[in-house]
Image: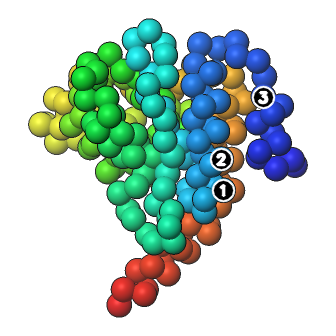
Amino acid sequence: MKPLNEQIDLAPSCEQPDDLWAKRCCQQALLAIEQGCYGVGAVFVNAENELVCESRNQVFVEGDYQSQRHAEMELIDLLENQFSHLNRRNLTLYVSLEPCVMCTGRILLSGIGRVRYLAKDAVGGLLTHRHHLPPAWANLAQQVSVAPARVDLFWSRFAQQCIEVNADQMRQKVVKHWEGMR
């Protein structure tokens, strides 16, 4: 199998509605992998279908474990710091992997209108399980449209590969970090 960075060059043309944003998410995921982080990327798109900003997982950037630096968290930080004037209800968050518990909470509190993900996270994803949230959080969740992105199957598979390529290594890094804290 070809390396991921070569596979992205073989991607199909953008025929599905969300393919362009899927490609941007996957490019960010590749950058995260190159930096020794989890392969997750995310982008914000406005109501006119224009890129607002993009980011990637940076949990292990600079050699130190920083639990809050998930792709979605980095992206929301960027939005709040540089694009606070935008109506968040009109934004769509595209992310290569279904958001985790922490990121889901932040997404719900931030007021983002739509979330589209490329790969489902069967183990840690929460957005597709928002019907299990406590009442106050469930009320927030009702205001967010969540669905798989409308993409060529290539992008969903590619996003999944970006997670799987270094998942064991990432888990070992987290364990090593916590063992060093004892």
Label 3 element class? loop
Kindly check if marks 2 and 1 are in contact, taking CB atoms under 8 A apart as contact: yes
As shown in the figure, which amino acid type bears the numbered disc 3?
Ala
Badge 1 is on which residue? 34
**61 left or right of 127?**
right
Residue ranking furthest to the top: 48
Q: Is residue 146 above or below residue 3?
A: above
Q: In this view, does 175 lie above or below 149?
A: below
Kindly check if marks 3 and 2 are in contact, taking CB atoms under 8 A apart as contact: no
Exactly how many numbered labels are in the figure?
A: 3
| Residue 139 on image: x %, y % | 16, 29
Q: Is residue 2 above or below residue 66?
A: above
As shown in the figure, which amino acid type bears the numbered disc 2?
Leu
Query: Which of the 4 quarters of the picture holds residue 81?
Result: top left
* Quadrant of the drawing holding the C terminus: bottom left
**8 left or right of 155?**
right
Q: In this view, does 147 lie above or below 125?
A: above
The residue depicted at 64 percent of the width and 39 percent of the height is 27
Between the residue at mark 2 and the residue at mark 1, the CA separation in whole angstroms equals: 6 Å
Residue 128 visible (yes or no): yes
**Front disc: 3 or 2:** 2
Instruction: Point out the tag, 3 or 2, that comes first from the N-terminus.
Output: 3
As shown in the figure, which amino acid type bears the numbered disc 1?
Glu
Badge 3 is on which residue? 11
Instruction: Point out the tag, 3 or 1, that comes first from the N-terminus.
Output: 3
Kindly check if marks 3 and 1 are in contact, taking CB atoms under 8 A apart as contact: no
| Residue 177 on image: x %, y % | 45, 79
Badge 2 is on which residue? 30
Query: Which of the 4 quarters of the picture holds residue 159?
Result: top right
Between the residue at mark 3 and the residue at mark 1, the CA separation in whole angstroms equals: 20 Å
| Residue 117 on image: x %, y % | 50, 32
